[in-house]
Image: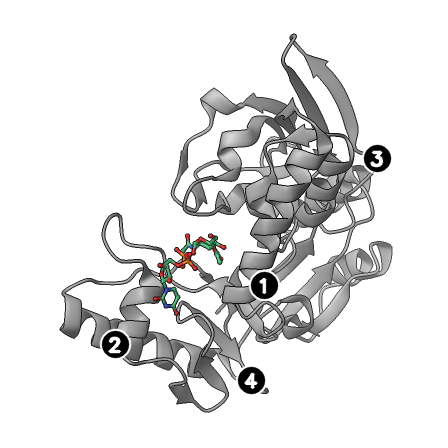
Amino acid sequence: MVIKNTAVSKLVQEFKLLVDEPLKKYTSFKIGGPADLLALPKDKLELKKLIKKASVLDIPITLFGGGTNVLITDKGIRGLVIITKHLKSKIYTAQAGLQKKTIYVEAGERLSKVCLFAVQHSLSGLEDAAGIPGTVGGAIMMNAGTRTWNISDSLESIDVFDKNTLVFKTIKRKKLDFSYRQLNQSGIILAATLVLTPKPREEIEIIFKENLTRKNMVQPVSAASAGCFFKNPVSGKSAGELIDNSGLKGMKINDAMVSEKHANFIVNTGNASCEDVLLLKKHIQKIVLKNYHIKLETEVRLQGE
Ligand code: EPU
């Protein structure tokens, strides 16, 4: 990107924006072309100022959390990408009625740290989140979860910032439209209040550790991937089973491969491009459709030009 516009060049200087920054550095898939402009604001105030100025200049804005559930195109993302992972502060707890407690956490906090905090404070509710990568903000946008739990189950409210009106507001859980791996809500998530139940720490710890051990055993957690690639069908066999039973484990297109460990993971074994992953995705969908008459839908979000 050649910056000809003086106003944009001022924005770059003021907010120390990175220009033509490869996004593969910021995604767990290690895939993705450049962002024209990239920002890593250190707090809410800086984020607000940046959005205000970028909006005046009509620069399109894309938000990123931990980059753990996205597939970025090889051409990358036009406009400004804002990574919210530095938006974090102390985690606060509060009593909520007689039986419950809440924890307040900023959006850039890693979900793994929040899980640990809950265990250390004898708070139950996030045991299923053991080992889920990414930030709290990203997990809420994706309604991250397992077969039996979604983060929306543990949510009391979120704090969002409206890009257009530049107003902060708190939205209660019951006003939020969550579906499977999705939150339909505009605005930038800045923080969340989770509602948890006090329980003996040992009980929570045992379940948490069991979940983590199981996840490490069945999923390729240390490989470069974006987690489960396809959504599970509403009923019947899981996406992993359908792909596995179709004999596709280990199938490769260049460096994009169906994991040998869990068939619903596409892993980047070295230098896979987005195009390689998309070709592999199409192939998987074609074979599963032929074998089971089921059209697998992607869970991972494709972003970019
Ligand atoms: N299976 C196979 N072959 C495979 C993988 C799985 O036969 O290669 C079978 C398993 O034996 C099991 C069934 O498929 O009977 C379900 O597998 P698993 O328990 O691994 O759960 P999943 O439905 O594949 C879901 C979430 C995961 C989450 C786990 C935790 C989705 C799409 N996936 O996986 O979430 O970690 O439950 O139990 O909802 C993610 O969203 O990125 C993700 C990884």
Camera-side mark, 4 or 1: 1
Residue type at mark 2 is Ser
Which label's residue is closer to the chain start, 1 or 2?
1
- The residues tagged by marks 1 and 2 sit, at their Cα atoms, a distance apart of 24 Å
Frontmost residue, 245 versus 209: 209
Badge 2 local density, few (<14 within 10 Å), some, or many (20+)?
some
- The residues tagged by marks 4 and 3 sit, at their Cα atoms, a distance apart of 37 Å
Which secondary structure lies at badge 1?
helix
- Check whether the beta carbons of the residues at disc 4 and disc 3 lie within 8 A of each other: no
- Check whether the beta carbons of the residues at disc 3 and disc 2 lie within 8 A of each other: no
**Do we see residue 144 in this rendering?**
yes
Q: Quadrant of ligand 1?
A: bottom left
Q: Which mark is residue 246?
A: 2
Residue at disc 1, CB closer than 8 Å to ligand 1? no
Q: Residue at x 77, y 30 (%)?
A: 121
- Check whether the beta carbons of the residues at disc 2 and disc 4 lie within 8 A of each other: no
Camera-side mark, 1 or 2: 1
Which label's residue is closer to the chain start, 3 or 2?
3
Residue at disc 2, CB closer than 8 Å to ligand 1? no
Above or below, comparing residue 260 to residue 26 in the picture: below
Which label's residue is closer to the chain start, 2 or 4?
2
**Do we see residue 132 in this rendering?**
no
- The residues tagged by marks 4 and 1 sit, at their Cα atoms, a distance apart of 18 Å
- The residue at which mark 1 appears reads as 216
Residue type at mark 3 is Lys
Left or right of 113, for residue 239: left
- The residue at which mark 4 appears reads as 269
Residue at disc 3, CB closer than 8 Å to ligand 1? no
Badge 4 local density, few (<14 within 10 Å), some, or many (20+)?
some
Quarter occupied by residue 60:
bottom right
Which label's residue is closer to the chain start, 4 or 1?
1
Frontmost residue, 161 versus 19: 161
